[in-house]
Image (tube, rainbow, N blue to C red):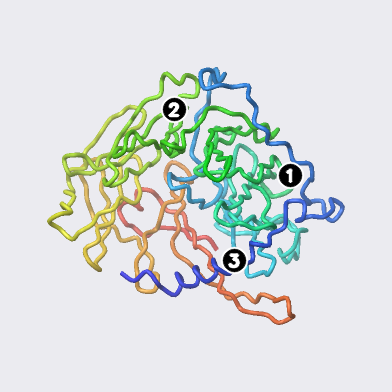
Amino acid sequence: MSYHSTITRALLVFSLLLSVLLSGCVTPSGQNTSTSETTNSMQQEPISSDISSSTSDSDPQHSSLPEIVPLQKQDGYVWGGYGKDGFYYIRSSGRSDGSCNIMYADYSSGKVLYLCSQANCAHNNSSCTSYIIPSSGGVSPMVVGEKLILVSQKSPYIESDDDKSSYIMTADLDGSNRTVLTQFKSNQFLEKPMLSDGNYLYLRLTTQVDADTEKADLIRIDCISGETEFLRSMDSKLNERIWGAFGDKILVYQYIDDNTIGLVSWDLNDTSNDEVLFTWKMNDTYPILGDGVLSYVGDDGYFHLMDLQSKEDIPLSQYSIPTSDISNISVTPLFADNGHLLIRELNGSECTYFALDTSGGIQTFDLLYDVDGDSEIFYPITSVDEDHYLVCGGFSVQNEVSPLDDGSSTVLPVPDRLYAIINKDDYWHSITSSRSFE
């Protein structure tokens, strides 16, 4: 397979150009120099991110916790923010200030809109509620309760005098009333995936104490007040990091020993209830998390689906995984959901996808889009409701004219994803019934 398609090259070129532009990003206060400029300007009184020490490892003082849900998948990749009525995501631009726009894919109308209610708005300056300048690590939209959360993140890999610390903003769901919720120190880095219980944002906060010392903590942030609360330490030597959540438990990736990795459920009410749910060897295929399920490769040579609540474990024995030492075929699990698993089988340059289910069914999966001769799956981003997925079904590339400092201009290829809604049953049976956003 060739992974250097036209769109891929466009993405790479644009990413490199964008990283150069972002190296001179303005600070939060620089985005809107005066609150009198516009009613949508950011309020300039960030709440201190000093971490409350009212909790301890032995007694986090949470008498009861609501359901905690992941805001990203286990790899931490940010597709966008999942609202009950629509999907928020970031669209890049070719503008020389490195700015981008918050877009809103409305489920009911099937339209993609700038998150802006102003008539005849050009969406290219701070008077627009969709306009935003990210930090070097980008900006990530998330939805917590009835608030839009915007995490503007400093990259630990880019050093610049102009690159200020990470910060979190909140806004109303229509993009108005954007306010700095909390600001972090320059040596602190926010890690994904992040979690939410509808009121708080849970995340791993890493503090670079000095060149050789890193400190990591599990914290939660009140999305109304901005109060930041320490929950418990995360051991950097054990590489402890968030992988997901189920019920009121947080799932933590952790080194068990030099050759073993574990997935551990953390109980924030009582650390004595922590439980190792699953372990695997360093060289094994990594398990993947779905909505309340874990997919992994069993010792019997089959994929398994395990319900994280009930611990019910079902082998998908309709597909035997080829033995790597006698076969050139490699198999990768891509997406798991309740009762289903999607896998990719790669044999040289030949790529085939299969959908497996817990009833013993197996069929070729062919909801694919073409990327310059290569195939990619319609990837489920989130559940719109019990019966429908929001999927990414391709890319488009628009050429945007970007002015340069010397008065001339250049044309940049700006990629944008194409989204659609599809019935879940149709998805697993490769039935093309998706409704694309306009």
What residue do we see at 62% from left, 74% from top?
400
Q: Secondary structure at mark 1?
A: strand
* Disc 3 versus disc 1: nearer the observer: 3
* Residue for badge 3: 18
Up-down relation of residue 201 to residue 323 (above or below): above
In terms of sequence position, does the residue under pointer 3 or pointer 1 come before the other?
3
Q: Quadrant of residue 132?
A: bottom right
Q: Nearer the viewer, residue 267 or 339?
A: 267
How many angstroms separate mark 2 from mark 1 (CA)? 32 Å
* Amino acid found under the numbered disc labelled 1: Thr
Q: Position of residue 247 (x, y in %)?
A: 45, 29
Q: Mark 3 touching mark 1, by CB under 8 A?
A: no
Label count reads 3
Q: Secondary structure at mark 3?
A: helix
Characterize the local packing of mark 1: few (<14), some (14-19) or many (20 or more) Cα atoms within 10 angstroms: many
Q: Secondary structure at mark 2?
A: strand
* Amino acid found under the numbered disc labelled 2: Trp
Q: Mark 3 touching mark 2, by CB under 8 A?
A: no
Which mark is drawn over residue 266? 2
Q: Position of residue 301 (x, y in %)?
A: 17, 44
